[in-house]
Every structure is written in C-alpha cells, then in structure tokens.
Amino acid sequence: MLDRRPFCTKARKRSSCTVGDFLLCPSMALKGLLGTSFAFQVGVTDLCCSSGEGGKTVIPRKVIGKFSIRLVPDQDPDQITSIVTDHLEAKFKELGSSNTLRVSTEHGAKAWVSDPNHPNFAAGRAAVRKVYGIEPDLTREGGSIPITLTFEDATKKNVLLLPMGAGDDGAHSQNEKINRKNYIEGIKMLGVYLEEIAQQN
C-alpha cells in the first residue's frame, strides 16, 4: 500500500523507477506532436499536413508539441509553469535558431491528496470488498480532476474518488468507453458505499 510512502523529491532514471515511484513522482507525458513526419495527437484525428505513410520532404512552417506534467502535493502549478517555460526558452536560445518559440499553458491545478484512513475511505474500501470481493489498492494515482481540491476546500469535507472503470477505458480519448459490467458493478458499489456511510453516522 502506498498511502504511507513519501512523495519523491529527486529525479530518477526511468529504468530504476518502480510502479510506486511512477505513481508518487512528478512526471511528464507527451500528448501530441503536429507538423512533422512523425505526427500524432492523443484523442484528435486531424494530424496536420505531413502525417500518413511515406517519406516527407516538405519542411513544415510550424510544429506544435503538447505535453502535460503531473504534479504532486506542495508543487505550485504557476511556479512549475514558470520553471518549465524558462528552461524551454533557454534551451531554444542555445540553438541560435532564426525561428521563434512560443510556450503557452492551457490550464493548471494544484495536486490533491487525502487521508486514506478517513471513514469516507473506509466506506469506499468496504464497498469494493462487498461488490468485487477483493481488497482495493490505494495507489494515489494521478489524474486530471482539479475540481476535487476545489470541492474539498469549499466544503471543508473529505473527498473520495471512487473509480469504476478499467485501465484500458482510454479516458478523455475519442474512443473512451466503459465496460457494461463495470457500469453495472459500479452502480452497485455506489449503493453499498452510501449504505456504509449511513451506518457510520
């Protein structure tokens, strides 16, 4: 269980990272690269002019790269944006290129972590055990749900993310899905969770 492990503070080589490190460390993911012969973008079908099979001899006028950074608690998104922007601009300047670089941020949010020993989480674990017949793993896995922290700050109440999907659901992609069985079992799990919460009060 990862609930007692500290967040890592040192950069590590990918080859030495464990699953726990992957879930607890800040990380960066490449989300799209448009305008090159190797063009792709997660969840988008328009891959620009030079995608497709075969060699490309045309130099594009513009290349767009998209990436996301997973933060951990105590990291400020504005500060990280500033650090990353300064780094990219410094590296681009070293190239001595006549081209221009523009760095922009679509959105950022503070990381969220909660107490897994809270009664709310105990009810969630009990619901998973009763419906699925297994003890849930508390992985502290990252996600893009900034409203979680907003809810917790506004209500001053514990917030629980109770998942019902699978690892291959393709969240946020054009082919996002949820298995029918997970949908049905998820409804059961929510019902049992509410019953468990009611019994605690």
Image (tube, grey):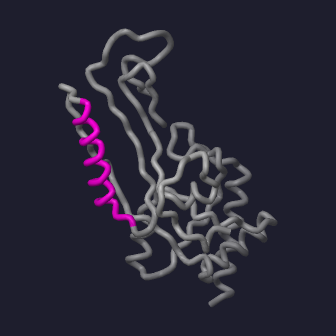
For image coordinates 37% across by 9% down, the residue present is 57
Q: Which image quadrant for residue 128? A: bottom right
Q: Is residue 79 rendered magenta in the image?
A: yes
Along the line of sight, the residue nearer the viewer: 74 or 136: 74
For image coordinates 71% across by 72% down, the residue present is 127
For image coordinates 50% across by 13% down, the residue present is 53
SS majority, magenta: helix
Above-or-below relation of 5 to 107: below
Residue 88: give x, y in percent of width and height: 29, 42
Residue 106: give x, y in percent of width and height: 32, 48
Q: Which image quadrant for residue 110? A: bottom left
The quadrant of the image that shows the C terminus is bottom right
For image coordinates 25% across by 35% down, the residue present is 94
Residue 14: give x, y in percent of width and height: 56, 47
Where does the magenta region start and end? 75-95
Above-or-below relation of 25 to 158: above
Along the line of sight, the residue nearer the viewer: 9 or 51: 9
Residue 86 in the figure: left or right of residue 70 = left
Along the line of sight, the residue nearer the viewer: 12 or 59: 12
Q: Residue furthest left?
A: 98
Q: Is residue 146 rendered magenta in the image?
A: no
Total labels: the figure holds 0
Residue 139 in the figure: left or right of residue 99 = right
Above-or-below relation of 19 to 121: above
Q: Residue furthest right?
A: 133
Residue 173: give x, y in percent of width and height: 51, 40
The quadrant of the image that shows the N terminus is bottom right
Residue 24 in the figure: left or right of residue 86 = right
